Image (cartoon, coloured by chain):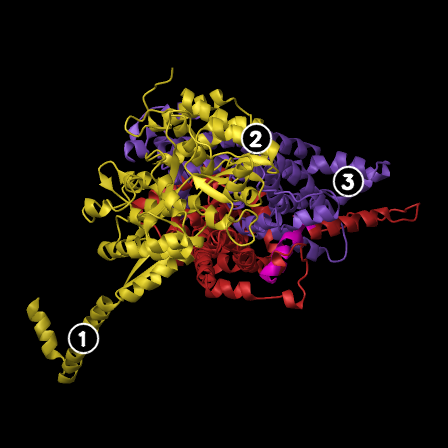
Chain colours: A red, B yellow, C purple
Amino acid sequence: MTTTHPTATPQANATGIPWKKVLLWSAIALTVIFSLGPPMWELLTSIKTNSAITADSVVYFPSLDQFTVEHYVQLFQRNQFHIYIFNSALVAIVSTVLCLGIGSPAAYALARLRIPGEQIVLACVLVVTLFPYILLFLGLLDLVRALGLANNYLALIIPYTAINMPLTILVMRSFFQQLPKDLEDSAKIDGYNTVQMLWQIVLPMTLPALVTTGILAFIFAWNEYIFALTFITRESMKTIPVAAAQLGGTTLFEVPYGPLAAATVIGTLPLVLLVLFFQRKIVQGLTAGSVKG
Amino acid sequence: MFDTLRNWVLQLGRRTRQAIAISAIAALVAIALGTWSVAQQPVTISFLVRAVEAEQLQLLVDQFEAENPDIRIDIVQGPNAADAVENLYTTSFLLGDSPYDLVYADVVWIPKFAAAGWLQDLSDRVSDDDLSAFLEADVLSGQYQDGLYRMPFRSDMGMLYYRTDVLDEIGAEPPETFEELLALAQQAQTETDVTWGFVWQGAQYEGLITNFVELVSGFGGFWVNPDTLEVGLDSPEAIAAVEFMRQVIADGITPGGVTNYIEEDSLRMFENGNALFLRNWPYVWAEANKDGSPVQGNIALKPMVHAEGQQPAACLGGWGFGLAVDTPHPDEAWRVVEFFTSRQGQKDFVLEFAYVPSRRDLFTDPDILAAFPHYQQLLEVAETTVPRPPVGQYAQISDILQRYLSAAITDQLSPEDAMQAAARETRRVLGSPDNNA
Amino acid sequence: MTQDYIRQRERRTGWLLILPALLVLLLVYAYPILRAFWLSVFTENLSTNLEPVFSGFENYGRMAQDGRFWASLGNTAIFTAASLVLELILGLGVALTLDQAFRGRGWVRTIAILPWALPTALIALAWRWIFNGEFGVWNDILMRLQIIGNPINWLGDPNWAMLGVIAADVWKTTSFVAILLLAGLQSIPQDLYEAHAIDGATPLQSFRKITLPLIMPQILIAMLFRFAQAFGIFDLIQVMTGGGPGGATEMVSLYIYATVMRYLDFGYGAALVVVTFVILIAVVAIAALYLSKVRHAAGVEE
């Protein structure tokens, strides 16, 4: 990827109205409103009292007496959302670490070592990135039942490790390919074997790449829905997306809009933070994972 | 080997030997204490309930726990749609390691859950004598093949509500047959200020099926014969039922929007005084008679209308308890079931929330009649209930029928084409004998 | 001799390094697909007491006459096509905007990525709330702008529900398309535009003559990814509408899920998986072929 550069070449504008500027800033404004609108609306809904939420005319910004944190309190007191957060974090972190631990060596081998069948492995990995999870859940259901993994974190950790594997291999492979080979050659001359060399010399240099891949893997694992919906039925082991989607109302006519909005905010907050801090890395990883493959 | 061990022990200093002995005793005591306290800890019986009902059931839970300190009841709140709750139960039993000891089940789930082997046969736990106190249809619908898999808790049935004031105004008696209903509806629409003659539930969902079941029975037809797996959807009677649905829309007796109506939409129409007849469930009575309702005191209910020479039919609904096959505490769970379905349990629940009991004598219980005088007529309706097909694939064939019924009443397909396609797909799913003419 | 030995050792180490990853991939990807092919020639459902009974191509025959399958396939096609077109147009717009130099570009880029990173199931909840027929903000905005007179029950009306889920999907994944296209835009050398401008070309002309052809590979890749995801969409629809009302937004994936998890019709569910898989692979193969051609052509032009 080349470095960023300005495309807007300043052109003399005869009419005096900077049409280009107007166009650009309205496009920027639209982009921002488009992207932020829905999450912001959830945030605003989550801090409104029930009567403000269901007011006859829509209340956009709650006044002081329409403001409440009751929905959040309810989520943690009645619905035990801290448990779901813990579950989501646990499976996402463990599967991410596993994925990096298993995927990076494979990526290295595919980037550096000449092995027969390399092209086939690579092609398979590429095609596999396109498989929707719905094609996998039936077979995985069989496995989960046969291995007795129902309501076991492993029933999520293993699939999550796998679904992030193609991405890890593709991103890490392209990083390894960019790494100067001299270093490894000299390490080999110094008598390191491949594993030692990987651990002591290559690993420290690939930390940034590992972080990039790890963030993406974490996002995918945190967001996964269909496996979490199918393989976990015990309330105390559910992950945030499933728990939020299954939030019931107290009466037939009263949908818990406030708690639903609050659950959305809680479940998205960690990812918002990740994007805020690692925006550049996410873009890098995504483009490396798909375009360079 | 034993010698080496003894030598080794002897070689240890006295102090060490003492320490080992003490810690061994301590460990034993700890284990004994642990077992004792586990044994003393109450057993937890868990089941999943739609959120709206979970809060109501708490009434009986509190009573039960006060009387049975050795058992805790943990009601997990599920989504409010019955389908969604069924899916959650299905997933947990299919996976194994189900967190639920009991199944609080809608009547139509039983064949599937029983066929899949997820429920215990209750025949040995309850005598025929005990069962005879319940409404017969409710008991029958809990049976699958030779077993009993559900104890009825609260019953539910479809019926016809009508406006007594409007019928008085046009000087008519409540209708018995389809023709009478059509004639009265049209008369009332022209002579009085009610806008619509008859409202019901026509959205593509299970409610549409319950309407259809009542009509098709009223015409003398059937959907599926559970014994022979024969499918009657393309019979003239079934097509006549669909025609009836289409006709009331076409004649302007029913609003066109009915094809998106669920129970609440039709109730609102009736409650606001805009309709003469309403097909709905028992809960409507309390809802339409509450203070401030425009039709308060002017409604009555009766069994559904039917074709000349046929019987009225009320679609049977209702909820009851099944015992999960892999529960570690079947006996404790059964005690919960007994309490909830007992006469007193049901009575308290009915008095508090105006549900319909599944025990026959509660309909004529003086306390209940004092609170809800219309339960006398409800019993009359309850005697006319018909079940939905008790087959394991019920959910599947219901979804097929919903699609084609909806297509027919929204004029996407003719009733004949729709019912023939529905019959064909249903036969395929059930593996029925091909009785297609 | 030693050269050969080193080669062999390298090969062995290579395979050892790949093996764990490969095993995980085989377990989670290969096994379920093969299993679906195998199971699809059996009838295993409640009428066989959940025991597999060989039935040949019976399941496929049933599918051919299954109105609901075709309806869900049609819905999936509409959803996929509409989402892809809209995402491409919007994504290109966002990418072109982000490619410009302006103050605060880093922030805008961060904001633009946000939708992609958020959990789809939760986003579905958010959109369900926005499109709520009674208290939804979308109705309020449209009514304030006098575009509609009465509130619309967006997700409750079979005619509007599809639009609703498409809107949510477009919102969620436009940023993914934009990110990929932006990378393509930034790899176009600036002097190409300058040379073109000197020749007297308008910006629109240079967009058509330079930008589009050069980012064609990225467009195709983005569309390929998006096709696969949209075709298998599950979480968004399941949470937003559950496939309703009346099956108006039921996608193949939801039908598969219901067939397996609700009807316990495993053999038929497997056949549905197989057919979906084959359609997907066929489209991907065609796209990949086309992509290699385009890449080749772009390479020649450069």
Q: Chain of mark 3?
A: C
For the residues labelled 1 and 3, the Cα–Cα distance comes to 85 Å
Q: Residues within 10 Å of mark 2 (few under 14, many from 20)?
A: some
Q: Chain of mark 1?
A: B
Res. C35 in view:
no
The correct choice, above or below, for C223 with respect to B320 in the image is above
Say whether marks 3 and 2 touch (CB < 8 Å): no
Instruction: Give a yes or no on whether discs 3 and 2 share a subunit.
Output: no
The chain letter under disc 2 is B
Neighbours of disc 3 within 10 Å: few (<14), some (14-19), many (20+): few
| Residue on which the image places disc 2 | B187
Q: Which disc, if any, is residue B29? A: 1
Nearer to me, A168 or C235: C235
What range of the chain is rendered magenta? A34-51
Indicate left or right for A134 with B268 as reference.
left
C279 relative to A112, above or below: above
Q: Report the magenta stretch's main SS.
A: helix
Of residue C120 and residue B406, the one placed in the foreground of this image is: B406
Label 2 secondary element: helix
Q: Tag 3: residue type?
A: Leu
Circle nearer the viewer, 2 or 1: 2
Asked if the magenta segment contains residue A42, the reply would be: yes
Q: Is residue B361 left or right of residue A206?
A: left
Residue A64's label in the rendered image is: none
In the image shown, does C64 or B223 lie closer to the viewer?
B223
- Identified by mark 2, the residue type is Gln
Quadrant where the image shows the C terminus of chain C: top right
Residue B278 at x, y = what percent?
A: 50, 39
The residue indicated by pointer 3 is C192
Q: State the residue at coordinates (53%, 54%).
A: B291
For the residue labelled by badge 1, is the local secondary structure a helix, a strand or a loop?
helix
Q: Which residue is more in the foreground, C116 or A210?
A: C116
